[in-house]
Image (spheres, helix red, strand yellow):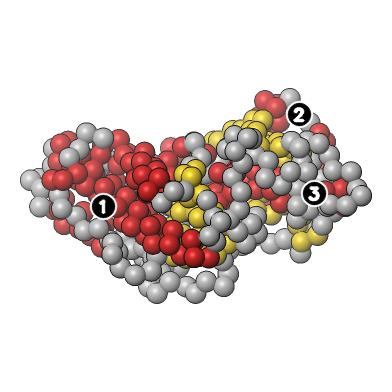
């Protein structure tokens, strides 16, 4: 249930000048928290400032398994979350009662971890009497770009968003804090998953995205002519399983234990093909965005894969060609973090969108509930 508390609604009530929210993120393998503030609160497009943030990554816990193990993740969140929240408050020099709200990721994600974060958030809200905001992890990625732009150049709705992470690959129009129109999604793997699987295949370790990007930096992408998935096809959907198979076949043809240059060339070819596919799909989405919102002025990229330099460069060129402003959060705010959740909390609280403490965790929680499931899509959240 969503309620609108009096202090932040428009009208005769006094709107506070500054607003600070604690955000908690535990939906995958980062135990993270942050405090984010904005001022003045009355301006619904004003960006924010990160007061303090801590990300405790569980990479070392999951590395032996080559991927995230849900049960290990949930236990690690339980072990670390209290300390992470304490550290965030200490670094900010703030007590809980000096905050204006508590936000926690309520889904989608690994349910064990989400439960740890949402329960902590609700408990803190209950103990302090502060408003509680249940945050959609994808919405938090989607809104992060509005946190980091300069105050004299706010990012206004609507904007076109390419959301690329380990579990998601979508093109969406972000029309408001609460309204998202999905234009395309993946019919099989997410692009981050393809990076991770390619890294595993090439023996580049975990997590895959940054490892592939590092290897690709000294590679020759032209050496392996890999397919460009979906390029030229109608619509804005994605597909990455064929590219993954093509990498596997190319790797199998290498002499045993391909040398570092072979690996670098294959990583570069994969990254190039993935970037070309993302750019082609996004170009189509720009047409649809323009039809629906002729006033729309920005292309935004978000999610862990948005940290990739080659993909950012591709999208920068694409936006320039179409006369759109390109906005990408700094790479550290592309991968999962607490600031994105705290910021989504600010965005909701300043509109008076507060949730009841009975809000239940949602392992699946699409941003555009009216969008049909993609043909062939798996069961990922
Ligand atoms: O958003 P995120 O931190 O978690 C999810 O919500 O999924 O995204 C993680 C994904 C992983 O697949 C990771 O390999 C990928 O983002 N990633 C990258 C890079 N950094 C992280 N992919 C390509 N290049 C990178 N530099
Ligand atoms: Zn994420």
- For mark 3, does the 10 Å Cα neighbourhood hold few (<14), some (14 to 19), or many (20 or more) residues? many
Mark toward the start of the polypeptide (1 vs 2): 2
Mark toward the start of the polypeptide (2 vs 3): 2
Q: Which mark is residue 131?
A: 3
Residue topped by disc 1: 273
Which of the pair 305/287 is nearer the observer? 287
- For mark 2, does the 10 Å Cα neighbourhood hold few (<14), some (14 to 19), or many (20 or more) residues? few
- For mark 1, does the 10 Å Cα neighbourhood hold few (<14), some (14 to 19), or many (20 or more) residues? many
Asked whether, in this view, residue 236 is left or right of residue 120, the answer is left
Asked whether, in this view, residue 266 is left or right of residue 48, the answer is left
Tally of numbered tags: 3
Instruction: Decide: is 358 above or below 22.
Output: below
* SS at circle 2: loop
Residue at 69% over, 62% down: 360
Residue at 26% over, 52% down: 273
Residue 208, how many percent across, how many down? 34, 44
Contact flag, marks 1 and 2 (Cβ < 8 Å): no
Mark yes or no: residue 141 visible.
yes
């Amino acid at each position: 249930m969503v309620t609108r508390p009096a202090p932040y609604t428009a009208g005769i009530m006094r709107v506070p000048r500054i607003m600070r929210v604690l955000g908690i993120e535990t939906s995958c393998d980062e135990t993270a928290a942050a405090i984010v503030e904005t001022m003045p609160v009355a301006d619904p497009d004003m960006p924010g400032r990160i007061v303090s943030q801590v990300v405790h990554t569980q990479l070392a816990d999951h590395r032996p398994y080559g991927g995230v193990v849900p049960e290990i993740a949930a236990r690690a969140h339980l072990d670390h979350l209290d300390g992470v929240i304490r550290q965030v408050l200490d670094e900010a020099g703030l007590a809980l009662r000096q905050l204006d709200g508590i936000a926690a990721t309520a889904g989608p994600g690994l349910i064990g971890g989400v439960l740890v974060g949402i329960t902590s958030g609700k408990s803190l809200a209950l103990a302090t009497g502060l408003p509680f905001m249940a945050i959609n992890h994808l919405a938090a990625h989607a809104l992060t770009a509005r946190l980091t732009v300069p105050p004299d150049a706010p990012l206004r709705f609507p904007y076109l968003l390419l959301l690329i992470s380990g579990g998601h690959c979508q093109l969406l129009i972000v029309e408001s804090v609460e309204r998202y129109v999905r234009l395309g999604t993946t019919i099989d793997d997410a692009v981050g998953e393809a990076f991770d699987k390619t890294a595993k295949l090439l023996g580049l370790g975990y997590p895959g995205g940054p490892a592939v990007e590092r290897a690709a930096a000294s590679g020759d992408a032209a050496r392996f002519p890999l397919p460009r998935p979906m390029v030229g096809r109608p619509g804005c959907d994605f597909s990455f399983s064929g590219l993954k198979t093509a990498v596997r076949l190319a790797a199998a043809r290498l002499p045993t234990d391909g040398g570092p240059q072979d690996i670098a060339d294959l990583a570069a070819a994969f990254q190039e093909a993935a970037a070309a596919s993302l750019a082609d799909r996004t170009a189509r989405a720009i047409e649809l965005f323009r039809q629906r919102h002729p006033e729309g002025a920005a292309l935004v990229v978000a999610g862990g894969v948005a940290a990739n330099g080659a993909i950012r460069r591709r999208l920068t060129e694409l936006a320039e060609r179409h006369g759109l402003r390109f906005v990408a959060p700094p790479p550290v705010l592309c991968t999962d973090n607490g600031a994105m959740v705290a910021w989504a909390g600010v965005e909701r609280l300043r509109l008076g969108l507060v949730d009841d403490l009975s809000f239940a965790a949602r392992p699946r929680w699409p941003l555009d509930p009216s969008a049909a499931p993609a043909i062939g899509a798996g069961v990922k959240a």
